[in-house]
Amino acid sequence: MFAKKHRIVLVLCIIAAVAVSACGSVKPPEDCGVGGTADDAKFAQHFAQMELVNKATGQPGEESAEGGAKFSVNDVVAIRAGSLGTTSVRACVQERTGGGKIALDVTVTAEEGERLLSLGLFPQGSYVVRVIVDGTLVKNLPFVVQ
């Protein structure tokens, strides 16, 4: 009887240890470090316009049912921006579903005038490009890849 109680206690301790170690490996969703509402005033200081386009055609994606542009898995997605001056721009592409992983995080220098910033190909899913200037979110560009 005594040995049986010890075995039960041992098994319960092992289960508790496994559960605690599993909880330690749970990670929060990845984050671009900014979110929420974009700062329209700061955007207007740096850009005349900004939209997502198919890099090959230069055309914006169709409007998706979820809001934002729609592209195919074969489209190279790019940001077309009209920059008012030389600005360091961070483009952080985050999944909108499935844990919100970061698909791309790049910083480039946008010179004055209209420029294309290639973001690349993406697998099917729903995304948002967080456009960041000086640590401030200036634009959210949602898009869907089908």
Image: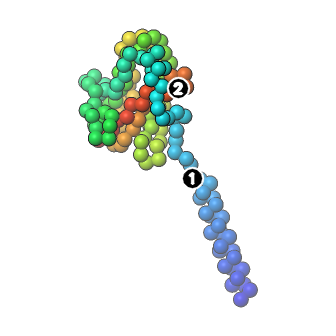
Q: Is residue 107 above or below residue 8?
A: above
Q: Please identify the quadrant where the N terminus is shown.
A: bottom right
Residue bearing mark 1: 26
| Horizontal side, residue 98 vs residue 55: left or right | right
- Residue 107 in view of the camera: no
- In the rendered image, the residue lying farthest to the front is 41
Q: How many numbered circles are shown? A: 2
- Residue 2 in view of the camera: yes
Image position, residue 96 (x, y; %): 42, 42
Residue at the image point whose x is 38% and y is 16% from the top: 48
| Horizontal side, residue 23 vs residue 142: left or right | right
Three-letter code, disc 1: Val
The answer to which quarter of the image holds residue 65 is top left
The answer to which quarter of the image holds residue 15 is bottom right
N-term-proximal mark, 1 vs 2 = 1
Residue in front for this viewpoint, 73 or 97: 97
Residue bearing mark 2: 136
- In the rendered image, the residue lying farthest to the right is 2
Instruction: Count neighbours of disc 2 (C-alpha within 10 A) and say few if under 14, some if 14 to 19, many if 20 or more.
Output: some
What's the distance in space between the residues labelled 1 and 2, CA to CA?
29 Å
Q: Is residue 63 above or below residue 84?
A: below
Helix, strand, or loop for circle 1?
loop
Q: Please identify the quadrant where the C terminus is shown.
A: top left
Cβ atoms at labels 1 and 2 below 8 Å apart: no
Helix, strand, or loop for circle 2?
strand
Q: Is residue 35 above or below residue 57?
A: below
